[in-house]
Image (spheres, rainbow, N blue to C red):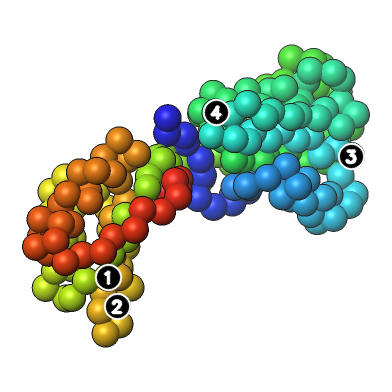
Amino acid sequence: MPYRTITDAAEAEIEIKRSRFIGFVAPVGTEEEAREVIAARRSAHPKARHHCTAFVLDPDSRTRRFSDDGEPAGTAGAPILDVLTGHELTFVVAVVTRYFGGTLLGAGGLVRAYGQAASAAVDLVRIVTRHERVPVTAPLDYAQANAVERAAGNRGWTCRAEYGAQVTVDVLVPVAEVDAALAMLADLTAGRAEPTVGDVEWC
């Protein structure tokens, strides 16, 4: 089952009744990385009153955490999390930093403000879909490598290649198509290829 994530970090700021809301999103691989990003945002804005956060992890998005960081319960972390889940994102952390402007916004106003700040940051990043793929790897000569890359492209598979005296080609295929990739390599090299099957990757 594929998942959606972001490729880079982004920051966006909105102002509501003199309160500044700075939204920030970044890709992360683990809960520890998410907490490091949150700590870095606190360090970058030490005078801000609140740093409200949410993050989602795992290919099936089962790990979800959020914090209101002193705002009324449910008015900050939850709407930030809703932005991430609404975009069906995982392996991502969002932090919205608030500099209080002196005017209370009320619960509804806070929900809208934190959600809008997170959304503004998400709007700036590139979203990609990652799929489970198995690398089928073989050392080939240059002519064989060209033929394999063409054939793989025709089947919708992607290739990675390292060039040296020979070319080491990784054909990245869905789990169910490993046997088809092995057959293709045998076919195009007259059985001389000695492929190895690697572990599942997300790419």
The residue lying toward the viewer, choosing from 197 and 118, is 197
Image disc number at residue 139:
1
**Alpha carbon of mark 1 to alpha carbon of mark 3: how far?**
58 Å
Give the position of the N terminus as an image quadrant. Answer: top left
The residue that label 2 is drawn on is 163
User: Which residue is at 51% across, 28% downward?
Assistant: 88
**Alpha carbon of mark 1 to alpha carbon of mark 2: how far?**
10 Å
Q: Kindly check if marks 1 and 3 are in contact, taking CB atoms under 8 A apart as contact.
A: no
Q: Position of residue 100 (x, y in %)?
A: 86, 36
Q: Nearer the viewer, mark 3 or mark 2?
A: 2
**Alpha carbon of mark 1 to alpha carbon of mark 4: how far?**
35 Å
Q: Is residue 81 left or right of residue 39?
A: left
State whether residue 192 is above or below residue 55. Answer: below
Say which amino acid is labelled 2. Tyr
Figure label count: 4
Say which amino acid is labelled 4. Asp
Sequence order check: which comes first, mark 1 or mark 3?
Answer: 3
SS type, badge 2 = strand
Say which amino acid is labelled 3. Arg
SS type, badge 1 = strand
